[in-house]
Amino acid sequence: MTVEELPVEGFERVVVDRAPGGALRSVIAVHDTTLGPALGGVRMRPYDNEEAAVAECLALARAMTLKAAATGLELGGGWSVIPGDVSAKTPELLLAHGRAIASLAGRFIPVNDVGTDQDDLRKIGEVAAPVCAQGDPSPWTALGVAAGILACARHLGHTELTGLRVGVQGAGHVGSALVHLLAEAGAEVLVSDVVAERAETVAESVGAEVVDPGALLTRELDVLAPCALGGVVTPASVGELRCRVIAGGANNVLASTRLAEDLLARGIVYAPDFCVNAGGAIFLQEQLLGHDHEAIRRRVLTVGEVITDLLTHATTDGIPTTQAAHDLANARLAKAAAAD
Ligand code: NAD
């Protein structure tokens, strides 16, 4: 194993693992461990070049620090990337990545992400500890999103979700679990997926309406819950939206942070994605701490309190909720750093 340090401003550690011959085998970024060890995904996908792989790894690690800090986790932010098609994944490659992770002596705790699954994490766990490989976080992400949606509804003067019309974009792991929670809470649920049968299956089980994926964003909704891919709010779509709230599981819902100001100007309440979708990360932290399901549930439901605080702060100061979330995260990091 040839692990090299890559000095990157603003990062505690960035290590690069090279195969014999010098090709990049993986990169691991530990952005900030002020609040605790850095939790982060292991992503495997092809990149155009080494720089692109490193750049995505750094961006994801930074975003994880922000999520952990804004939502009160005792964790830092990191990420790792194995460049290449998943067809090139072998036990030897995963073990090499595990040894590179082990060189960080527990400062990076990996979890599966795009291109990796829990079996891969267990393989990595043969040579590195700890790793997160004990259960799907998606239902917990959905539980946190449901709590965040209720917080947004209360901010607008509703007491419960009963009768509110919620459109869920994406009926995958998070979206389908969310549809069930919303239906149980009495919401009128609309669901769409580019794979129509996914939307149909979940809609049938709870009596929801299936909507064409191209039509959901322009439907009149109380809440739009993006649970598919990012880039839902774009300069083109922002003027077309007919919802009062946006709160969902997807990452990077805004194509650019500037769009948070456009949503504010249009009076659309936006629950920052990296806060409202933190239930899965909370689950992983609580599991690492050995807490039981009831304790995990209580902790995940605090996502609602975080969203309420952000909405209050943003309204009082007349700023976008994304700005309020950055302020909260930076204040927490500064306080913890000063206490060290
Ligand atoms: P998933 O792949 O299981 O589900 C995504 C679904 O969205 C798929 O069924 C796909 O067909 C559908 N889809 C894609 N484009 C669509 C479109 N334009 N309109 C409608 N449907 C579309 O993924 P997931 O694990 O449910 O995650 C969903 C989102 O939440 C992702 O952005 C992910 O990064 C984010 N997220 C997930 C978790 C988690 O715990 N799984 C945690 C935090 C964030």
Image: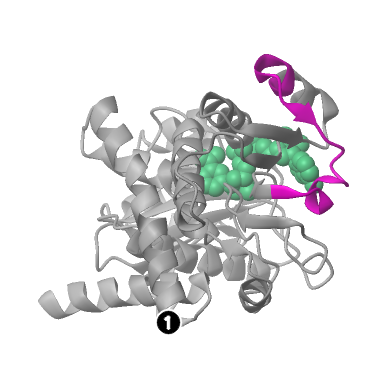
Which quadrant of the figure shows ligand 1? top right
The answer to whether residue 28 is left or right of residue 45 is: left
Q: Nearer the viewer, residue 270 or 57?
A: 270
In the image, residue 284 sits, relative to residue 230, either above or below, namely: above
Q: Quadrant of residue 268?
A: bottom right
The x and y percentages for residue 221 are 71, 48
Q: Position of residue 212 (x, y in %)?
A: 87, 38
User: Residue placed farthest to the top in the image?
Assistant: 205
Horizontally, residue 203 falls left or right of residue 21, namely right
Residue range of the region highlighted in magenta in the rendering: 202-221
Instruction: For mark 1, give the secondary structure.
Output: helix
Residue linked to disc 1: 317
Q: Along the horizontal axis of the image, is 44 left or right of 60? A: right
Does the Cβ of the disc 1 residue fall within 8 Å of ligand 1? no
Residue 105 x/y as whole percent:
26, 54
On the image, the x and y values in percent for residue 155 come to 46, 57
Residue 316 visible in image: yes
Give neighbour class at mark 1: few <14, some 14-19, many 20+ (Cα, 10 Å): few
Residue at image coords 43%, 53%: 40
User: In what quadrant of the picture does the N terminus appear?
Assistant: bottom left
Reply yes or no: does residue 215 show up in magenta. yes
**Picture quarter with the C terminus:** bottom left
Q: In the image shown, does 99 or 295 lie closer to the viewer?
A: 295
